Image (tube, rainbow, N blue to C red):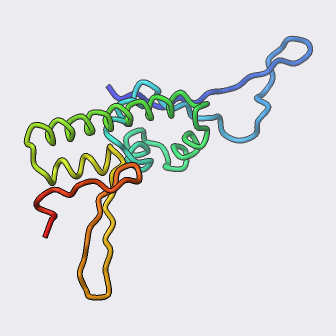
Amino acid sequence: MKAKPTRKVQKSSSRNGSLSKPKKAGRPKIELPVEMAHGFGQLGLTFDDMADILGISRRTVAREFSEGEASDFVTEYRRGRANTNRSIRMKILQRAIKEDKDNVLLFAAKNYCGMKETAEVDHQGQISVNVTMGGEVIKQPKWMQN
């Protein structure tokens, strides 16, 4: 069953206790379904994707995200996105360790351990690659050596 966004009508009371019209002009705010936000985040859906699924405009979704942490929808979306990122990182690291292949290990080391490669070209046209971690040059794997 598809959850539909709902419109939130804000009512205020006058001095004599009777209800009056909302203070804000324009259309009532659309409340996005928080129960769907986690799943949207896990899938990494874009504003356009979420708008299409919910049957609302992209601008409405963007407006919700502009509220940041004040929005329960945004908070749940970010939790879902973080869960997926964590799962992907774990899978890459497990694969790197299990397969013991230099290219997979190098990818994991650069992306998760802060390592980086720099290429230097001397005037004779030779290329040397220095691998650093925390500012210190570390020993290169055999396949990278001349």
Picture residue at 26% right of the left edge, 67% below the top: 129
Tell me if residue 114 comes above or below residue 146 in the rendering: above
Image quadrant occupied by the N terminus: top left
Question: Residue most toward the top?
Answer: 17
Tell me if residue 63 comes above or below residue 10 in the rendering: below
Where's residue 83, x and y in %?
Answer: 34, 31
Q: 54 or 79, which is in the foreground?
A: 79
- Picture quarter containing residue 30? top right
Where's residue 88, x and y in %?
Answer: 25, 39
Picture residue at 44% right of the left edge, 34% below the top: 77
On the rendered structure, is 67 left or right of 58? right
On the rendered structure, is 41 left or right of 126? right
Where's residue 110, x and y in %?
Answer: 30, 51
Picture residue at 36% right of the left edge, 44% below the top: 45
On the rendered structure, is 6 left or right of 128? right
Picture residue at 66% right of the left edge, 39% below the top: 27
Where's residue 124, x and y in %?
Answer: 26, 88
Image quadrant occupied by the C terminus: bottom left
Tell me if residue 47 comes above or below residue 117 in the rendering: above
